[in-house]
Amino acid sequence: MTILASTPPTTSEAILTTLMAEAGNERRKDTLIRLKEACDYLVATGTPFQLTNVQRVIENKFGKEAGPKAQSISNERKRPLGMYHYVEARERELQASKLPSRSIQPGRSEAVARAIDRIDDIDTRSAMHDLYDRLVVAEKSLARAKVVFKTLGRGADWEHLISGQERQEGAVGLPISEELVVALQRLVRVLTDNGKLEVVGLHYDGRRVRRKTGTRDELLDPKTLEGVQVLAKQLLAR
């Protein structure tokens, strides 16, 4: 009689169901539930699937003592089936759902994505996906920049455009209506008004706009916000 070895589940839902069934006590089940909620948050917010991010989400939501910790998840990689495999499956499923939108050049980008998916370490794989996404954005930005430069007329000071230096005296600028200036004023007031920002879970700390709670991810860095404020003042002083 031939005994067939059971095949481990591969989908995240099946893995979690198996882990919950194998859990020896309620504490383990609670740990698995927190793990699932953390992964749900990473998917919903687009946060990279790194074990340190999983731990940070759990601690922010359930307290510093709550688990699982990143190291505990990593340690279960050696098991036939563990928390590490659940996180890995969640990331794999997320990447699979994003794969069609990855391509700039069909064929090449899909091959790169498949190569990254074969990286064993989940944190390294997540970091590589993040770098690849940055490359895709950079290539698109370069393509847009080339189109813009083609539209520049003869004599355009493209070196100043690239360097970000101020426009030379005598250069002709686009007309800015009073309505646009008022709209910019309103934007600055909203970005620095905690009464309005906190309604949508944001907070202005005097320098930057970020999430009020949780991971406190940054929406606007100090340099960008300061630039918008200075621009508004300059336009008002015209």
Image (cartoon, rainbow, N blue to C red):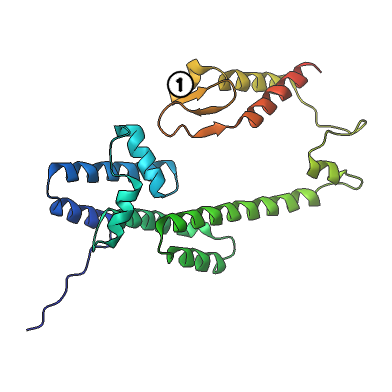
Position in image of residue 116 (x %, y %):
47, 63
- Name which residue type carries label 1: Glu
* Residue at the extreme left of the image, as rendered: 1
Q: Nearer the viewer, residue 73 or 22?
A: 73
Q: Residue at x 23, y 57 (%)?
A: 15
235 vs 109: above or below: above
Quadrant into which the N terminus falls = bottom left
Q: Is residue 24 left or right of residue 136?
A: left
90 vs 176: above or below: below
Tell me which corner region of the image, top left, top right, bottom left or bottom right, holds residue 164. Answer: top right
Position in image of residue 155 (x %, y %):
92, 45
How many numbered discs sit on the rendered protein?
1
Q: Residue at x 55, y 54 (%)?
A: 131
Q: Residue at x 36, y 44 (%)?
A: 54
Position in image of residue 58 (x %, y %):
33, 38
* Residue at the extreme bottom of the image, as rendered: 1
Position in image of residue 49 (x %, y %):
41, 50
Q: Is residue 29 left or right of residue 62?
A: left
Tell me which corner region of the image, top left, top right, bottom left or bottom right, holds residue 175. Answer: top right
Q: Nearer the viewer, residue 8 or 101?
A: 8
Q: Residue at x 28, y 41 (%)?
A: 67
Secondary structure of residue under mark 1: helix
Q: Which residue is mark 1?
A: 198
| Crowd rating for badge 1 (residues with CA inside 10 Å; few <14, some 14–19, many 20+) | few
